[in-house]
């Protein structure tokens, strides 16, 4: 039996009850409790939510608990809801894709109305949202959380239809995750060069491209074919991870496992027929002598580097969906503005220019975040602050920037990176070395977080 099959077997044999008991034994109950103690309040306010993904559903469920018979409308085109944090597990052959998909209708709270279409226009002055089906919704409170759009066209030569074939892969879609796992198994037989890129925009779960590389490395070892393969990670920025203690641990793990990495290399072009990926980087060279400054000029030039591959994993560059980019909600300047990310106060999550607009999830232009774990902590803050605004008060709840990235470093081990706006680790369970790979975090990632997401977070109780 393949290790992989054993793992699936173990998974099926471990009931949710056993898994929760296991986690209880290791004291992880703080991960399960995040409920909101607010009394049910009456209001006639019309509340509109753009996007019924992780953030939209979670906030709607919490509004349902906090308000007496609320008037909430969720705009969400997709009839299926996917637990995206499980994509990596599908890409690594750990769980089947069906475990991640549910019907959206089963998660829309009873008190909410569902418009199954896209929002196409936001008029923040007259407080109206236009829908693709032609309807116009008026609102008193708007919650904008349509997640991020994938900009595949920013990689020259890449036709998104080719993803999943000919060695080009992504775990950023569910289909893509299934194909990634199929090809990892084939790659284990042939060996070759595997590349893993990381774009120069904020992305959902910035750790995910590394997780799939760790899983490939470990899978190849289990298949005794690691020596036939060369694995290289290309980070577009100057760091492997934004928080120093986790970055140090990642670099040590990479070095000890013969996993290569290059910094300042951004994937800009791909030739899928020739299997060549082109990365943009920069080189400095000494220029002419400057008589006035009495030193050599420092010249920085773009350089394009071609790399051959047999397998490449690509997370797409990302930006805010068009409806947000075309609206007055994005930052007016700076990088977040270029990508259309929404201008909110990073603590209250209230829009900086429109007091009746709140935003959360992947689409906001704040440091770190872009994980489901972040949404879980943001949602009660947004709901409390909406109640404050409805009661004519200033927003009282504050979000501290909590971000969680369970970095799967091999089958059976996870290093749990939790941090916040301070740029320091923010462990939910203190007293444990945060930079250690642990089996207990693997148990939490593989067995606990998915039921907690569907039965706790999306129901507004965890
Ligand atoms: C590969 C991968 C691995 C991940 N790993 C983890 C992890 O380990 N841990 C973790 O906590 N998180 C992880 N995440 C991140 C997590 O899934 C996201 O942070 C979370 O889903 C963000 O929630 P959201 O509601 O902002 O966006 P989404 O959940 O993406 O929802 C946005 C919704 O808005 C809808 N929408 C878009 N445009 C419009 C429009 N114009 N009108 C109306 N609706 C619209 C979309 O259909 C979608 O349903 C991972 C994500 C991926 C892709």
Image (cartoon, helix red, strand yellow):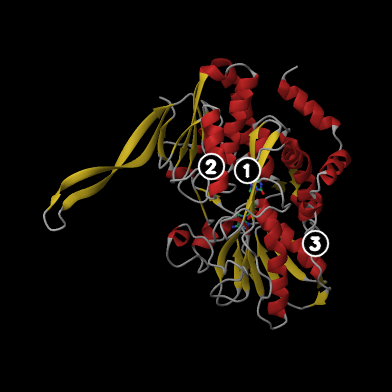
Q: Tell me what residue is drawn at x 54 percent, y 64 percent.
A: 342
Residue 107 position by quadrant? bottom right
The N terminus appears in which quarter of the rendering?
top right
**Residue 52 at least partly seen:** no
Q: Position of residue 411 (x, y in %)?
A: 68, 30
- Residue 71 tag number: none
CA neighbours of label 1 inside 10 A, class few (<14), some (14 to 19), many (20+): some
Circle 3 is placed at which residue position?
Answer: 35
Respond yes or no on whether mark 2 lies under 8 Å from ligand 1. no
Q: In the rendered structure, are the residues bearing label 1 and label 2 in contact, judged by CB atoms less than 8 Å apart?
A: yes
**Would you place residue 383 above or below residue 164 in this image?**
below
The C terminus appears in which quarter of the rendering?
bottom right
**Circle 2 — which element?**
helix
Q: CA distance from mark 1 to mark 2?
A: 9 Å
- Residue 435 tag number: 1
Q: Tell me what residue is drawn at x 81 percent, y 76 percent.
A: 41
Residue situated in front as seen by the camera: 414 or 144: 414
Q: Position of residue 116 (x, y in %)?
A: 69, 56
Circle 2 is placed at which residue position?
Answer: 248
Residue 220 position by quadrant? top right
In the image, taking residue 259 as reference, residue 57 lies left or right, namely right
**Residue 348 at least partly seen:** yes
Q: Closer to us: mark 3 or mark 2? A: 2
Q: In the rendered structure, are the residues bearing label 3 and label 1 in contact, judged by CB atoms less than 8 Å apart?
A: no
CA neighbours of label 2 inside 10 A, class few (<14), some (14 to 19), many (20+): some
**Would you place residue 375 above or below residue 390 in this image?**
above
């Amino acid at each position: 039996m393949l290790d992989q099959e054993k793992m699936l077997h173990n998974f099926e044999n471990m009931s949710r009850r056993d898994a929760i008991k296991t986690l209880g034994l290791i004291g992880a109950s703080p991960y399960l409790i995040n409920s909101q103690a607010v009394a049910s309040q009456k209001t006639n306010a019309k509340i509109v939510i753009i996007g019924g993904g992780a953030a939209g559903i979670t906030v709607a469920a919490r509004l349902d608990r906090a308000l007496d018979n609320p008037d909430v409308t969720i705009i969400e085109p997709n009839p299926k809801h996917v637990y995206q944090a499980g994509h990596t597990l599908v890409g690594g052959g750990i769980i089947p894709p069906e475990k991640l998909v549910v019907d959206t209708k089963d998660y829309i709270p009873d008190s909410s109305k569902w418009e199954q279409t896209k929002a196409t226009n936001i008029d923040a002055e007259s407080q109206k949202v236009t829908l693709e089906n032609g309807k116009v919704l008026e609102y008193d409170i708007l919650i904008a959380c349509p997640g991020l759009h994938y900009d595949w066209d920013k990689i020259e030569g890449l036709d998104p239809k080719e993803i999943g074939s000919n060695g080009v892969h992504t775990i950023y879609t569910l289909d893509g995750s299934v194909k990634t796992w199929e090809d990892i198994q084939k790659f284990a037989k042939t060996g070759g060069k595997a590349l893993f890129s990381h774009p120069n925009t904020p992305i959902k779960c910035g750790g995910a491209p590394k997780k799939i590389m760790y899983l490939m490395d470990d899978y190849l070892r289990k298949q005794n074919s690691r020596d036939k393969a060369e694995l290289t990670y290309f980070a577009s920025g100057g760091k492997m991870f934004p928080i120093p203690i986790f970055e140090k641990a990642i670099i040590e793990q990479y070095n000890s496992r013969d996993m290569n990495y290059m910094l300042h290399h951004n994937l800009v072009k791909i030739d899928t027929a020739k299997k060549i990926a082109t990365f943009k980087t920069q080189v400095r060279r000494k220029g002419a002598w400057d008589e006035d400054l009495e030193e050599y000029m420092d010249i920085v030039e773009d350089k394009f580097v071609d790399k051959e591959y047999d397998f490449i994993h690509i997370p797409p560059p990302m930006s805010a969906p068009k409806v947000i980019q075309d609206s007055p909600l994005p930052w007016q300047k700076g990088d977040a503005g270029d990508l259309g990310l929404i201008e909110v106060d990073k603590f209250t999550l209230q829009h900086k220019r429109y007091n009746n607009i709140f935003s959360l999830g992947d689409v906001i232009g704040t440091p770190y975040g872009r994980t489901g774990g972040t949404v879980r902590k943001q949602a009660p803050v947004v709901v409390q602050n909406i109640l404050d605004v409805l009661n004519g008060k200033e927003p009282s709840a504050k979000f501290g920037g909590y971000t969680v990235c369970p970095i799967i470093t091999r089958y059976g081990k996870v290093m749990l990176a939790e941090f916040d706006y301070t740029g320091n680790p923010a462990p939910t369970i203190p007293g444990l070395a945060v930079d250690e790979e642990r089996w207990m975090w693997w148990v939490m990632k593989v067995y606990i977080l998915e039921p907690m997401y569907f039965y706790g977070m999306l129901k507004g109780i965890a």
